[in-house]
Image (cartoon, helix red, strand yellow):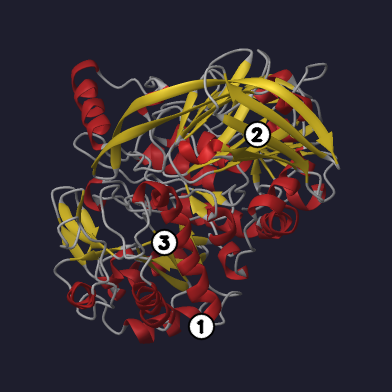
Amino acid sequence: MKGVISINQKSFEQLELQVGSGTNDFKMSRGSFKYRQHIDQKIKLDHVSSDTSENVTTIKFKAAHSDITVKAQITTLDNGITKLSFLGDTGKFNRFWIRLKSNESEHIYGCGETYSKFDLKGEKVRIFVAEHQNANRIGKKIIKEKIFGKHPEKTLSFDKYESYYAQPTFVSSEKYFIHVDVSAYSEFDFRKKDHITLYTQETPVIYYYKAQSFEELSGKLSELLGHQRTLPSWVYKGAILAIQEGTEKIDEKIKKVEDKGGKVCGIWSQDWCGCRRTGFGYQVMWNWQWDKDLYHNLDIKIKEWKQKGIRFLGYINPFIALEGELYKTASKEGFCVKAKDGSDYLVTITTFPAAMVDFTNPKAYDWYKSLIKENMIGLGMGGWMADFGEYLPLDCVLFSGEDPQKLHNRWPSIWAQMNKEAIKECGVSDDVFFFTRAGHTGTISASAMMWTGDQHVDWSVDDGIASVIPATLSLAMSGYGLTHSDVGGYTTIMHMTRSKELLLRWEEMNVFSPLFRSHEGNQPSRNVQFDGDDELLEQLSRSSRLHERLAFYIKECVEENAARALPVMRPLFYHYDEKDAYTEKTEYLLGRDILVAPVLKENSESRNVYLPDDTWIHLFSKKEYKGGNYEIEGKVGMPPVFVRKNAEQFEKLIEVTDNL
């Protein structure tokens, strides 16, 4: 991507600006939002003057037929990042359109988490956190598959998708980033060949940096947004297995895996606090207290498992079940988000209503944090899924009096911050972690780890196994470098159930990620599970051993992310300035030295692999390849994975599959 003019400070001096005002109409259903707006006015401002004084450039804009004046002030911060802020009559408006120059050959990445697309050039991205798995969209997919059959490669138009993690940050193939400091609804429009339009609903502050390499760019972005910490050392020592329905079942399944020589470092039981059975499936009872009837002697068993090197993990989210004791306390104390009539605002999730705790109320915030500290960490948990965060209603009333339309995007980071504080205040930061799915600006520095959400248990490009890599890489280019996915996916509806082949392929892919964690899905009895037969147990055990053998390398990558903000799973162009690298979305680099090209199609035992210009050794066959495109065999258990021959730890890496 050489010889192309990119956005720079001069581009800011040539920006085009429009301001206006308008109103929004949001309708939420199960965390998904239908959005309409009415624009009352949109005013084009003319560039009338520009001057530079003491390293500050001020550009004056004025409306042609009024006295409306806005000034754009450009400064360079001490760390070299350019800051663009707006002064003057900005308080009169809640709509801003900033147009910056672009070019046809530029590739755009980031904006949080995107699934069917990785390169966003040609798309308009909505910066608004929401439930990615839209119930209406899933329903239409199921009906179409029933009538026309499955077409996993088919995707919807990009504007049909929402995202758990939406962040006003993007990175260009020309090695610059732009981050916009806003919380309200925004849109980044990359559809035009020659310009980019940033649309915000509050006065923006824009940050820009141009680097010589993507490594430098990631480091500089982390100076602005923060980065994740390291993970506890125990997470690398095998698989974290999803097992529910009691301590007896946990012991039974641990023994099955260990008898096959598998390595188990954790057990993840979502239903530690009880379950509810609904039309959607087997779901958690959101009353964050140990269910002693379901999990007999859990406090004792957690200690026993820990002595064996196995940690126990749980689950929590920002909602409270109406049937539980905790809701009685929260409602009595006024800790819940309110409706306009003063009642507790009840949000429907899948098939049942629940209350949300109001984190703007300091007493409610501290109370909820105490549940994590006492009922989870106090019980001995080594970690948990901190789910949700996307559902703050836009018509609710908050304790603080803040506008929920301004706070909605920030809610996931507030939720992550609470979990981070609970761990820190208990003094267990080196041994306990949590993982989240929702995010916006602020999540990077608060959340320990992401997972890519509730994938379908299928092969679809838009929502299945094939969506994991674009989601992971888009997060990486947004500044969030520590991600994993549910092995096997989650969402099961009607005929959409997990096959044996899908589970095997997902396992062999997730070995090459920071965390190897399975999921039973929302309907466990209808999905193939890791212990379904001997072949499945053998594969799970083999995968867990391989993940443990890679621990030295993965841990080093995680530490590199914590220290230098280099994402653990990276796009190929991160290290290879080649045309094909900028459009590749089904392969990734695990750190600098391992290239992973998972088999993502059903009934396939090979795939086309693009190898950048280097010397690569196939991890399983030990065959040597130069850069180029190849059809690579990929039988189950032996996916196309390559080690860079010039890697510093090449000998150690290439031996991890020996006598596996």
Instruction: Assign a secondary structure to mark 3.
Output: strand
Q: Tell me if residue 309 comes above or below residue 192 in the rendering.
A: below
Residue hosting label 1: 307
Report the front residue among 54 and 251.
Answer: 54
Say which of 156 and 152 sits in front. 156
The residue lying at 45 percent from left, 61 percent from top is: 414
User: Of label 1 and label 2, which has the lower sequence position?
Assistant: 2
Residue 190 x %, y %:
55, 21
Query: Image quadrant of residue 596?
Result: top right
Secondary structure type for disc 2: strand
Of residues 43 and 478, the one drawn nearer to the viewer in this rendering: 43
Amino acid type of the residue tagged 3 in the rendering: Met
Disc on res. 385: 3
Residue 402 pos. (x, y %): 37, 57
Give me the residue at 53% from left, 64% from top: 263
Q: Which residue is mark 2?
A: 71
Closer to the chain start, of discs 2 and 3, is 2
Q: Residue at x 78, y 18 (%)?
A: 5
Alpha-carbon neighbours of circle 1 within 10 Å: few (<14), some, or many (≥20)?
few
Residue 616 location, x and y as percent? 77, 33
> Where is residue 646 shown, x and y percent of the image?
85, 40
3D distance between C-alphas at marks 1 and 3:
23 Å
Dot 3 crowding, Cα within 10 Å, few <14, some 14–19, many 20+? many
Q: Amino acid at mark 2?
A: Lys
- 530 in relation to 321, above or below: above
Please name the amino acid that badge 1 sits on.
Answer: Gln
Q: Quadrant of the N terminus?
A: top right
- 195 vs 133, left or right, is right
Q: Secondary structure at mark 1?
A: helix
